[in-house]
Image (spheres, coloured by chain):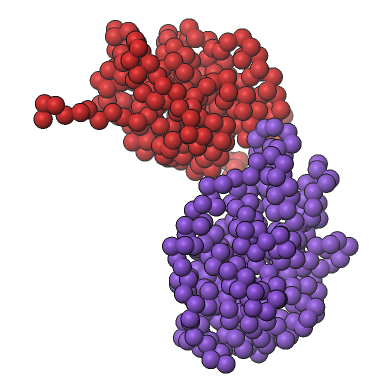
Chain colours: A red, B purple
């Protein structure tokens, strides 16, 4: 078997828990040091539309899972990633990433998933509140996920950048559509394979490879996307995101590139950015026969 | 009259033709025209045990004010309800060019005596139904009592008279294969159906493109033999614009332009209208829409 030909992976995209090719049939060749590495899907706006539709469809079911259960699923992602660590490092190096940096990238990514997973059932303990009011009401505030979140991966930090956006968004019940790094697209699809093996329901995470400048405007204008998280973009593209997101008042979460690489991002405030506060007024019914008031 | 299944449907041919239809798509102006046509052909439907007068009134409002932001849109063809809701619907629609369709004959199972079915049909018409959607007796059909099925349709058509159009629901999901669907279509057409309709929407699979093609072929043959046009109504499971446009392609290429009119072709659907609206708005505004900004019913 010494002369066997190695079977190469076909990198596709990740929509609704499945790995289809782009409906447009378009590809770009990823070349490093004059060696073609893979054909990468050049996703179209219709792939984006399908992704948003699938994220919207699964939202109600994902958000109604218990926080504890969602945390378990996040841990599962970390376990899966840990067991496939070598493959990811190899793939990063193949795409031209520095070896030492690759190892650090993997370690940080796995730890970061664990960090955010822990917040799943604690975020409302910290940020939720019972508010003092002057009338006969219980008044309390809870945080709820925003809805469908569009995420734009940073160009550098191919894995950490994805993890730092996707996990804090989905851990509280948001569903996501991610546009991958153009420079290191393969890592995003391998991460999709990990996610699809981790009991994450299809549609909670969708990942598209392709041209950012082509896809971002459709994402930013999409009326069914409630929030957009992104790290760094060229100035004109960034301005465009701010402009396009106005039509349905999307919540924009811009995370500086420096934060991704440092541990500064490991904070509940990032999770909170992908949530909305809901305050409820609940009339107090007094039972005069007892001293309790419920 | 003696009925036997004698028309063998070319299964491979039917499915091959559908495979080619589904690879095609309409673009820009043709798409917009197609979408508006789809809207005008929808029978906006609510057939739930929990329907209330208010729910039906709301649906009728939607039928006549499909999306106020775009005034140049056509109304849907009809509102389709249970017989007990016909009065409510016909009151709500009296000033509008939207028909009231009523299901009848013990919808959806059809398990009732002919006497009761006739009575139910009469009541629906008395209360203002312009169209009646009846179901065939599938049990009798499977027992080989084709004459019973034929006579029942003929009797209901007689009850409807010439002014009320009769749609005959075959419930193709319960009929088995294409040969039986073709055969049931022929029985319905010969018994006096004005429309043949695929499904009640209560059974899966409901309408599909290949089943619709089989039924359209029956309509075509009848037209060649007698010169008489019969309408077609696929119902159930058609919830997105792309699929609806493929149905239009199929009708155009099987029966021709004469049938591209809501007098001869209808969609039985409830959520299709919103998807069509979202697509029309996408074409006009250039960005994707959200269901949140459209009425639920």
Residue drawn at x 70%, y 76% is B227
Measuring from the top left, give residue B66's x and y in whole percent.
77, 50
Residue drawn at x 45%, y 72% is B176
| In the foreground, A178 or B12 | B12
Is B34 rendered above or below residue B42?
above
Would residue B182 be seen by someone viewing this image from the given angle? yes
| In the foreground, B242 or B297 | B242
Measuring from the top left, give residue B195's x and y in whole percent.
67, 72
Is B268 rendered above or below residue B9?
above
Residue drawn at x 79%, y 55% is B75
For this view, does B182 lie left or right of residue A113?
A: right
Q: Quadrant of the C terminus of chain A?
A: top right
- In the picture as drawn, the residue positioned furthest to the right comes out as B95
Measuring from the top left, give residue B165's x and y in whole percent.
74, 75
Residue drawn at x 48%, y 71% is B9
Is B172 rendered above or below residue B66?
below
């Amino acid at each position: 078997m010494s002369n066997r030909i190695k079977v190469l992976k076909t990198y596709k995209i990740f929509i609704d828990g499945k790995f289809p090719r782009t409906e447009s049939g378009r590809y770009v060749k990823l070349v490093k040091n004059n060696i073609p590495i893979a054909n990468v899907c050049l996703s179209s706006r219709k792939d984006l539309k399908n992704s948003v539709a699938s994220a919207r469809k699964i939202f109600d079911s994902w958000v109604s899972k218990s926080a504890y259960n969602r945390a378990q699923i996040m841990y599962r992602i970390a376990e899966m990633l840990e067991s496939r660590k070598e493959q990811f490092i190899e793939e990063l190096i193949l795409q031209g990433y520095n070896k030492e940096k690759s190892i650090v990238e993997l370690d940080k990514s796995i730890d970061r998933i664990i960090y955010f997973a822990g917040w799943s059932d604690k975020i409302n303990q910290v940020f939720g509140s019972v508010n003092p009011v002057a009338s006969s009401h219980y008044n309390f505030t809870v945080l709820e996920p925003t809805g469908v979140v569009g995420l734009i991966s940073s160009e550098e930090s191919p894995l950490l950048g994805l993890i730092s956006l996707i996990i804090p968004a989905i851990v509280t019940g948001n569903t996501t559509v991610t546009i991958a790094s153009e420079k290191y697209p393969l890592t995003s699809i391998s991460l999709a394979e990990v996610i699809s093996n981790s009991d994450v329901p299809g549609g909670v995470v969708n990942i598209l490879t392709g041209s950012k400048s082509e896809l971002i405007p459709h994402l930013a204008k999409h009326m069914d996307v409630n929030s957009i998280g992104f790290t760094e973009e060229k100035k004109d593209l960034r301005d465009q995101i701010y402009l396009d997101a106005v039509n349905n008042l999307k919540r924009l979460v811009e995370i500086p590139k420096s934060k991704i690489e440092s541990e500064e991002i490991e904070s509940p405030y990032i999770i909170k950015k992908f949530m909305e506060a809901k305050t409820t007024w609940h009339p107090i019914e007094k039972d005069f026969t007892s001293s309790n008031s419920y | 009259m003696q009925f036997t299944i004698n028309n063998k449907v070319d299964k491979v041919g039917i499915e091959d033709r559908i495979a080619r239809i589904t690879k095609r798509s309409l673009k820009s102006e043709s798409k917009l025209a197609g979408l508006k046509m789809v809207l005008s052909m929808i029978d906006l439907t609510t057939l739930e045990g929990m329907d209330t007068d208010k729910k039906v009134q709301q649906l009728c409002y939607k039928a006549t004010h499909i999306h106020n932001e775009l005034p140049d849109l056509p109304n849907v063809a009809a509102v389709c309800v249970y017989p007990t809701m016909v009065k409510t619907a016909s009151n709500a629609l009296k000033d509008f060019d939207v028909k009231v369709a009523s299901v009848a004959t013990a919808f959806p199972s059809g398990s009732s005596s002919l006497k009761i079915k006739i009575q139910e049909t009469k009541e629906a018409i008395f209360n203002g139904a312009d169209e009646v959607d009846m179901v065939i007796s599938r049990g009798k059909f499977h027992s080989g009592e084709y004459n019973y099925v034929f006579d029942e349709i003929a009797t209901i058509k007689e009850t409807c008279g010439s002014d009320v159009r009769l749609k005959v629901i075959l419930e193709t999901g319960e009929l088995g294969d294409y040969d039986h669907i073709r055969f049931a279509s022929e029985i319905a057409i010969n018994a006096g159906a004005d429309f043949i309709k695929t499904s009640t929407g209560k059974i899966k699979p409901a309408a599909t493109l290949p089943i619709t093609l089989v039924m359209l072929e029956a309509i075509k043959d009848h037209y060649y033999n007698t010169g008489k046009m019969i309408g077609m109504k696929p119902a159930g499971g058609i919830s997105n614009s792309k699929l609806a446009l493929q149905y239009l392609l199929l009708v155009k290429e099987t029966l021709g332009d004469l049938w591209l009119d809501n007098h001869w072709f209808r969609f039985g659907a409830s959520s299709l209208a919103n998807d069509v609206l979202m697509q029309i708005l996408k074409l006009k505004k250039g960005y994707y829409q959200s269901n949140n900004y459209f009425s639920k019913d």
